Each structure stands twice: as structure tokens, then as C-alpha cells.
Amino acid sequence: MRSGEPGHDVVVVLAGRASIVSPEGEKLGEAQAGMVVGEVSLCDAGPRTADVVAIGLVDAVVLPAQPLRSHLATDRQAGFVVLANLAKTLANRLRATNQKLDLLAEKGADSWDRAL
């Protein structure tokens, strides 16, 4: 997966690992067995927000987003389970991002204070 490309599918990692990398080349995280990548594009049908690069061999299942959306709309129980898990995943990633931003803000404030 490449940042900026259209997000037409979601990928479930079955085995192996993959790095999640920002467009600027910063490692954002790592996907491993049981994790999903491409979920942001599933939510908003927008372009990919990061690159995903395999670390060695990776087994994965590719789920086309449009048929998956249709299925989730038809099967409300499955839709609820998938969306609840998706919300949990996105909330965890948001919390991790907030922690990183807090650390950066603290480092920036300390540097500025020392400069005066």
C-alpha cells in the first residue's frame, strides 16, 4: 500500500509483520497477525494515509471495500461487530498519536525555555 493511492480494499494480516510508514518516511507502527490495515479508507473512501511495507513474508487477506460495506449494511450484526472493533482500533491509534504529540510538545517547551 502506498500513501495517497485510492483505498479500494482492507487487508487483514494473517501471519508476518508489516511496517506502517508516514509519507515522510517516519515509522508509525507495525501490523502483525490479526491486525487490519487500510481501515481508514474503509471509513471514508479517501486515499491511503500511510505506506504499508512487508517485513519479510506476510500472509494476508484482501477484502474489497465496496462489497464489504454492502455486506455490513445488509448484515447488521456483522456490521455492528466490525464497526465496534474498527472504532476501538482507531481510538487506540488516536490515543497513541496524542501521547506522541504530548511528548513532542513537552520537548519543544523545554527547548524553548532553555533558550531564554
Image (cartoon, rainbow, N blue to C red):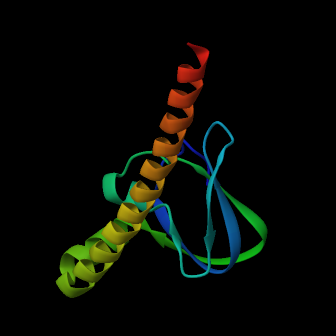
Question: Which residue is found at the position 55% from the left and 12% from the top?
Answer: 116
Residue 37 vs 103, above or below: the answer is below
Q: Position of residue 18 (x, y in %)?
A: 68, 65
- Left or right: residue 80 compared with residue 49: left
- Left or right: residue 57 compared with residue 37: right
Question: Which residue is found at the position 73% from the left and 64% from the top?
Answer: 54
Residue 3 vs 34, above or below: the answer is above
Q: Position of residue 76 (x, y in %)?
A: 18, 82
**Quarter assignment of residue 85:** bottom left
Question: Which residue is found at the position 51% from the left and 48% from the top?
Answer: 100
Name the one closer to the observer, 95 or 42. 95
Residue 109 vs 94, above or below: the answer is above
Residue furthest bottom as drawn: 77
Q: Position of residue 111 (x, y in %)?
A: 59, 25
Name the one closer to the observer, 55 or 61. 55
Question: Which residue is found at the position 36% from the left and 52% from the top?
Answer: 45
Which quarter of the rendered picture does the N terminus lie within? bottom right
**Quarter assignment of residue 41:** bottom left
The number of callouts visible is 0
Name the one closer to the observer, 108 or 58. 108
Q: Position of residue 53 (x, y in %)?
A: 70, 58
Residue furthest top as drawn: 116
